[in-house]
Image (spheres, rainbow, N blue to C red):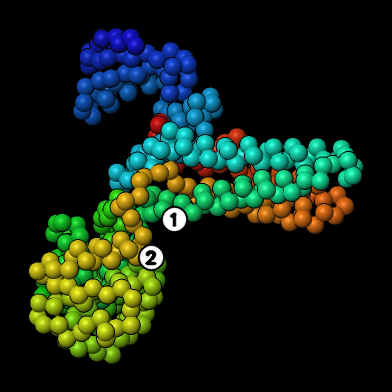
Amino acid sequence: MQIIYGHIVHDGKDIDEALLLPFRAPASYTREDVVELHVHGGSMSARSTLQAILQQGARPAEPGEFTRRAFLSGRIDLLQAEAVMDLIAAKSQRAAAAAVEQLEGHLSKSFDEIYDNLITVSADLEAQLDFDEDELPARTTEDLLLRLGLARKQLAALLSTWEEGHRLREGTLVVLAGRPNAGKSTLLNLLLGKDRAIVTPIAGTTRDSLEEEVILNGFPLRIVDTAGLRTADCQIEQEGIRRSRDLMQKAEIVIMLLDASRPLDPEDHELLATCPVENTLVLLNKTDLGQVVTAGHISYKHVVACSLLQTKGLEACKQALSEMLHLSTQTESHAVISERHRGMAQASIHAVKQTENILRQSGESSEMIAALALRDGIEQLGQITGRSYHDNLLEAIFSRFCVGK
C-alpha cells in the first residue's frame, strides 16, 4: 500500500498536514478506486478539510452509500451489509461478536445452502412437467419431499435464533414497578453501579420514567425506573403513575418490588394482580428490617428476598433475570437473524409447506402448482441475502445506516 504525506492547501493557505492512502480497484471496500485522507484529530481541522473538498466539487456520501456500493459490486451480500450496521450499533461484546460472525458470512452460508437446495428442487419439479407420470421414477416425489423437509427444518433452526437476535440488537425492556419507597431507584443504581436515580426517604420522589441500559451476560437490558404506584392527588404524579402502568404492559420483564418488612395489604395484592405471572420477578425488599412476607405468601414463580440497602440478594436478582430471559453465559456468540430475515424466512417456510402439501395430493397438474408455490418461497429467501432484490428493499436497509459508511 502506498502512503503519501503532504499538506492540505486551500485558497493559498495550509489547513493541515495529512496522509493520503489510495486504494486501487478492486482492492478496496467498494471494489472501486478509493482515496482515504487522514488529518489530525479535532473537529476544526476535519471540518475545514471537508469544506475545502466539497468546494472542489465533491459531495457527502449518502447514508450507507459505501456499504451499498460494496453490495452492488458483489463484494458482500445483504446479510453482510446489515452486519456492518449491527457491528457499529452493537451495545455489548456479545452483540459485536454476533455481528462479526454475520459479517464473515456464516449466516449467508446457511441461507445460501437452503436457497441452492430449493433451486434444485424447483428445477426438478419443472423438469417433471415435460414427462408423463408413468415415465418418472417411482421415488421422484418422495425424494423431492425429503429435500423440501430438510429445507423447512433448516429454516426453522434459523428462525429459532430471532429472539436472541432481537434482544442483542434492541435490548430487553425491564420495568421496575412497585409502591413508593419500595426500592426501585435503589435497584436501578445498584444495577448501573452508579447513582443515577435520586433516592430519598420521601415517598413519590420519582415522578417520571427513567431509562438506562445495563449489560447482563452480554445482553443489553433497557431498565426503566417508574413512578411509585399509589393513589395520588397530584396531577403530575398521576401522569407518572399512568405512564408506569403503560410501561408495565409493554415490558418483557416486570420487576415488582415489595416491602417484605410489613404485611401485604389490599393495594399490594392489587398491584400483583396486574402483573403476568411468568414474566414478573418479585423482589421482597427490606429484609434487613425483618421479613414478614416470604415466597410462600405469593403465588409467583420467580421470587427473591433481598435487602437492597445492604446489597444483599442483588446477585440472586441478576441470576433470576438471566434464567427468565434464558441468557446463558456458556453459549458461544453466533450470527442471529433480524426482524427482516424473520418475516421472509416465515414466508419461505409457508411456501415450502404449501409445496409439500400439493405434492402429497398427487393430483392432475400438481407439479405445476407446486412449482409455482415454491417459486415464491425461493424469491423470499433470495431477498434475505440479496440474490434477488429491488430498489425499495435496498432503500429500506441502507437508510438505517449512518452517513457515509
Judging by the rendered image, the residue that carries numbered circle 1 is: 163
Whether residue 316 is visible here, answered yes or no, is yes
* Foreground of the two, 208 or 229: 229
N-term mark: 1 or 2: 1
Residue 103 relative to residue 108: left or right: left
Q: Residue at x 22, y 14 (%)?
A: 17
* Foreground of the two, 65 or 316: 316
The quadrant of the picture occupied by the N terminus is top left
Give SS at disc 1. helix
Give SS at disc 2. loop
Q: Which mark is residue 252?
A: 2
Q: Amino acid at mark 1?
A: Glu
- Residue 217 rendering spot, x and y as whole percentages: 28, 53
Q: Residue at x 38, y 16 (%)?
A: 35
64 lies above or below 92: above
Check whether the beta carbons of the residues at disc 1 and disc 2 lie within 8 A of each other.
no
